[in-house]
Image (cartoon, helix red, strand yellow):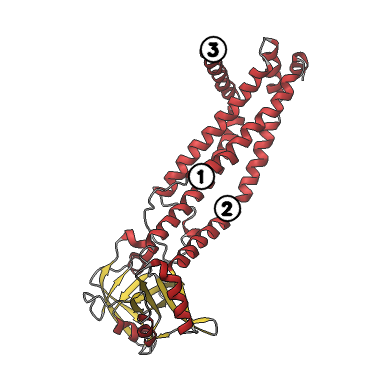
Amino acid sequence: MNKTIERHLNILDFTLSSLQRRRTKNLSLLAMYLLVIFLLASLLFFVSALKREAAIILNDAPDLVVQRLIAGRQDLIPKTYADEIAKIRGVSEVKPRLWGYYFDSWNGANYTIMASDDPSLKQGKASVGSGVARSRKMRVGEMFPLRAQAKVPLILEVDNIFLSRSDLMAADMIVITPDDFQQLFNFPSGQVTDLAVTVGNAKELPTVASKIASLFPDSRPILKSEIQRTYQSIFDWRGGMALLILASTVISFIIFAWDKATGLSAEERKEIGILKSIGWETSDVLLLKFWEGVVISLTAFVVGVILAYAHVFFLSAPLFAQALKGWSVLYPKFQLVPVMDVYQLVVLFFFTVVPYTTATIIPCWRAATIDPDAAMRS
């Protein structure tokens, strides 16, 4: 056992010396290898972290959201629907909701406007997301105007700015009273945007949804699980689109790595011939090239993953943020909680490290099996 370990250590020491002699070639390969690992690992980390954040936020979503459809499009729903739905067995609470979107021509941003019955929120006041405050350069106590549907200004006072840790959900949000909401959008009385339904037993959700759809044929009940799957699919889709963009880089790396790994230079063939002539076995030569591949690929993998971790969880992934967060103007600023999918890292390892390491052995086996004199003369 000791002799085996000593043999590997001696070959590894010779491997490091050999890599040092061809530093230009190996550093160029290592740089491209590291770049590919960094980009792919960053994408995996960022998508996984966003999916986790979305899942945490959606845990507080209503058990069931009821919308009304007219000609296949969402329309306002009468408040009277809430009274009928509340009578369904298993329904604990039905809460009408007022919300909508407001386009701010001042900065080209879309705000999410929500009405709240919170008694601490007074008419003429508003709680705003940090993205809104940042884009409008507002502070608590300052006034800001919104143009109402009737083309008259609605002057609101900033009563509160949401904490930055809620940016993923509230960066573009403005919360006002129901009276201010109706004035802003000239909202018809007796109508709401949708209904949030709470069901005591989660197992009864499909049954309650079926009863609502039967009671109101123009309604569309949406389960919380369906909303969660939609968000997960959105991030998977956007991550896939970003991966397609990186595909050209990955393909270029594969071509480059294969060329470097399978094409032995005259100097390398000569080195193999010398090693064979001084008593090295074919297995020793293969082990040498194996360790060369391991050193390069493993170094690129470890450093690339560490840099990707820092890029995503310390710098908030500036390379992918705009493509994957989804906001057109008000990009939220928030610190992602570190989360790593071990399975994805293992897959990334086997798709990047193993093929290259294997590819380095094939040409060396061919060179190691020929006559040493012929290898040195070539």
Q: Position of residue 71 (x, y in %)?
A: 55, 85
Q: Are marks 1 and 3 in contact (CB under 8 Å)?
A: no
At numbered mark 1, what does the secondary structure look like: helix, strand or loop? Answer: helix
User: Which of the two discs, 2 and 3, sits closer to the camera?
Assistant: 3
- Seen at 76% across and 19% down, the residue is 370
Please name whichever residue, 135 or 339, is drawn nearer the observer in this view of the structure: 339
Q: Position of residue 243 (x, y in %)?
A: 57, 53
Q: State left or right for residue 230 relative to residue 112.
A: right
Badge 2 or badge 1: first in the primary sequence: 2
Most extreme residue toward the front, as rendered?
89
- The dot on residue 243 is 2
Q: Which residue is mark 1?
A: 343
- The dot on residue 3 is 3
Q: Are marks 2 and 3 in contact (CB under 8 Å)?
A: no
Residue 30 in which image quadrant: top right
The amino acid marked with disc number 3 is: Lys
- Seen at 29% across and 62% down, the residue is 163
Please name whichever residue, 265 or 277, is drawn nearer the observer in this view of the structure: 277
The amino acid marked with disc number 1 is: Tyr
Badge 2 or badge 3: first in the primary sequence: 3
Distance between the alpha carbons at the discs numbered 2 and 3:
46 Å
- The dot on residue 292 is none
Q: Position of residue 75 (x, y in %)?
A: 47, 83
